[in-house]
Image (tube, rainbow, N blue to C red):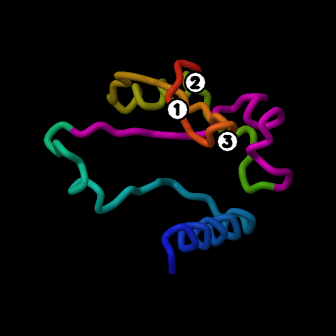
Amino acid sequence: MPLIRKNVKIARLHAKLVDKGRTFDAVLALEVIQHVANPANPSTILSTINRSVRAEYILQWLPKGCTHQWSSFLTPEELTMILQRTSLDVKEMAGFVYNPITGRWLLSQTT
């Protein structure tokens, strides 16, 4: 099964679990450190859709009836505070911007 189809299948399973009221206490990224060029100095990169009107209504990235709840999304400021409470330093924060003409994602100062 091609990787993309496998990922879609897993995402659908996740959606069914959430629909049934299942919650998750952690997100794990396992067996990936060997792919980091300098594992003695790794960075952690987190990504989430910002709780913003643009993501929800203008870009329509979240279809009606999706498994996400508006209140569950974190703003960049909230994510920073959570990480700082666990003694993690935020060294850099950037946003991703999608260009529908080129079909590419680019880093942006807009978070």
Q: Residue at x 66, y 69 (%)?
A: 12
Q: Label 3, on which residue? A: 72
Residue 30 position, x and y percent, is 33, 60
Q: Residue at x 58, y 72 (%)?
A: 5
| Structural crowding at the residue carrying mark 1, measured as other residues with C-alpha within 10 Å and reported as few (<14), some (14–19) or many (≥20) | few
For label 1, the residue is 106
Are the two marked residues, 2 and 1, in contact with CB atoms closer than 8 angstroms? no
Quadrant in which the C terminus appears: top right
Tag in front: 3 or 1: 1
Which of the two discs, 3 and 2, labels the residue nearer the N terminus?
A: 3
- Nearer the viewer's eye, disc 2 or disc 1? 1
Range of residues picked out in magenta: 42-65
Instruction: Find residue 34 and report its horizontal and vertical position in percent.
Output: 21, 56
- As displayed, is residue 15 above or below residue 81? below
Residue 73: horizontal and vertical position, in percent? 65, 38
Residue 7 drawn at (x, y percent): 54, 67
| Amino acid residing under circle 3 | Ser
- In the displayed image of the protein, which residue is found farthest to the left? 40
Name the residue tied to disc 2. Answer: 111
Mark 3 closeness class: few <14, some 14–19, many ≥20 residues within 10 Å: few
Residue lying at 54% horizontally and 28% vertically, measured from the top left: 95
Q: Tell me the distance, in whole angstroms, between the alpha carbons under discs 3 and 2.
A: 17 Å
**Residue 60 quadrant:** top right
Q: Secondary structure at mark 2?
A: loop
Sooner in the amino-acid sequence: mark 2 or mark 1: 1
53 above or below 42?
Answer: above
Say which residue appears at 34% left-offset and 22% top-offset: 91
Cα distance between the residues tagged 2 and 1: 12 Å
Decide if residue 64 is on the left or right side of residue 108: right
Query: Is residue 27 left or right of 105 when viewed as pictured?
Result: left
* Element class at badge 3: helix
Q: Are marks 3 and 1 in contact (CB under 8 Å)?
A: no
